[in-house]
Image (cartoon, rainbow, N blue to C red):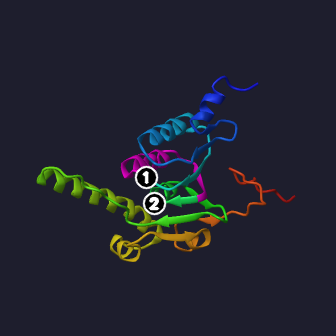
Amino acid sequence: TSHPLTSQLFDYGVHLASRTLFLFEEINRPTAAKVLMGLQVLGGDGPLTVKISTRGGCRAAGLSIYDGMRACPEVRAVGYGEVCSMGAVILQAAAVRELMPNAVVMVHPGYSSVAFDHDENTQRTAEYAKRMRDRCCEILAGKMGITLKQFLRRFTWDTYLTARQAVELGLADRVLDPHVPLSLVAAPALKVC
């Protein structure tokens, strides 16, 4: 028998039986709320998997997802399709970061738009946007073993990386073989008698 809330949880991207959370949407406040609720439901009872495929989105919402994943002790993230912009930052929150062979990771400093407003508000908004940009880029640069300044110089524009290139740069731990069954927990070592 299934749990009475199973279908409702699946609507929120949560699959209870496999302890998997699906993040296949634009990163915005409603998406962040769904992911954080999913992490709350799945957290604490052992390892969980977050499957990611997103073009990116809002930095503040993405950083809330990043923080929520970092608060869970055993999170594995698997990138599918496009893991772009804020999606690449969110991928870095997992203890284990894996990519499917055809996944593409796109990194860049991001875009900011400052609306027309009073000069002082425009300046404050621009400073906030720069702080948010720098924080996201620091996360990526840290995983790559380079400085923020080096990251901003190297990745001025959208940079699309194959799964293997992302691993080589330190943005993922490995590329998965799609023909090998995925396991959340390593098999226990056999004792030789």
Is residue 112 shown above or below 41? Answer: below
Q: Position of residue 110 (x, y in %)?
A: 38, 62
Quarter of the image for residue 98 reads bottom right
* Residue 118 on image: x %, y %: 12, 50
In the rendered image, is residue 19 in sight?
Answer: yes
Q: Nearer the viewer, residue 118 or 184?
A: 118
Q: Please, is residue 192 above or below residue 166 in the view?
A: above
Residue type highlighted by circle 1? Gly
Residues 77 and 47: in front is 77
Please, is residue 175 above or below residue 189 in the view? below
Judging from the image, what secondary structure is the residue with disc 2 in?
Answer: loop
What amino acid is found at the position of numbered circle 2 in the picture?
Ser
Query: Quarter holding the N terminus?
Result: top right
Label for residue 85?
2
Residue 57: mark: 1
Tell me the crowding category of disc 2: few under 14, some 14 to 19, or many 20 or more residues within 10 angstroms, Cα based.
many
Cβ atoms under marks 2 and 1 closer than 8 Å: yes
**Highlighted magenta segment, given as a residue range:** 57-81
Let me know if residue 190 is in the magenta part: no
- Of callouts 2 and 1, which one flags the residue occurring earlier in the amino acid sequence? 1
Indicate whether residue 62 is drawn in magenta.
Answer: yes
